[in-house]
Amino acid sequence: MLTETQLLQILPNARPVAGVFLAALNITLPRWEIDNPMRVAAFLAQVGHESGQFRYVKELGNDRYLARYDTGSLALRLGNTPQADGDGQLYCGRGLIQVTGRNNYQACSRALFGDERLLLQPQLLEQPRWACESAAWFWHSRGLNTLADRGEFNRITRHINGGLNGLQARLKLWARAREVLC
């Protein structure tokens, strides 16, 4: 069971929302087998970075920026329609890991709810409970527990980010999380 003190030692900028996310994390993490100190440390470091320490549960960017998900090869890869119809804005990154694209929303919805409600209500992933659940689902569905057990943090980062963006900041959070939890 993660405590608020531990969470704030790892993610001090989460102070305004720590209590809200703590309850959701303590329900979510064991359910998705993020259940040992190495897994929890790696998970918190990654979601802490991706969400600005729980301050952002929706991707930052205006409509013009999010339009990159709306047409072209990136849109198709994400499962969005090829027409400029707003899919990019509708299925922008949400949750603590920033689930992005129609395909990911659909898969996440099936895993969390057994239906496709996230396609109609993608903003559910902005609620603390579902922001945590979607991140843990993503983590589990990509086999990241195994990588966390082996300490393969760079590989985890590539799975989440597609590259190594923000690696130094992620590594600092991971070191702090390991110091607190391990």
Image (tube, rainbow, N blue to C red):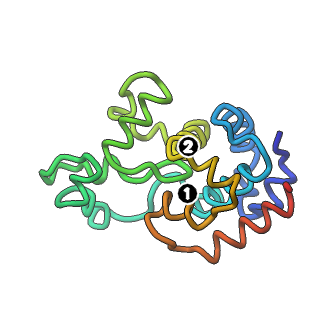
* Closer to the eye: label 1 or 2: 2
Q: Which residue is mark 2?
A: 131
Name the residue: 86% across, 59% down: 180
Q: Give the residue type that dot 2 points to.
A: Ala
| Mark before the other along the chain sequence, 1 or 2 | 1
Q: Nearer the viewer, residue 165 or 151?
A: 151
Residue 175: % across, % down: 77, 68
Residue 155: % across, % down: 55, 63
Residue 145: % across, % down: 64, 47
Q: Which mark is residue 1?
A: none
**Badge 2 element:** helix
- In the rendered view of the protein, which quadrant contains the C terminus? bottom right
Residue 148, above or below 131: below
- Badge 1 crowding class, 10 Å Cα cut-off, few under 14, some 14 to 19, many 20 or more, is some
Q: Nearer the viewer, residue 151 or 182?
A: 151
Q: CA distance from mark 1 to mark 2?
A: 10 Å
Name the residue: 50% across, 29% down: 112
- Badge 2 crowding class, 10 Å Cα cut-off, few under 14, some 14 to 19, many 20 or more, is many
Q: Nearer the viewer, residue 104 or 83?
A: 104
Q: Give the residue type that dot 1 points to.
A: Tyr
Q: Quadrant of residue 151?
A: bottom right
**Badge 1 element:** loop
- In the rendered view of the protein, which quadrant contains the N terminus? top right
Q: Which residue is mark 1?
A: 56
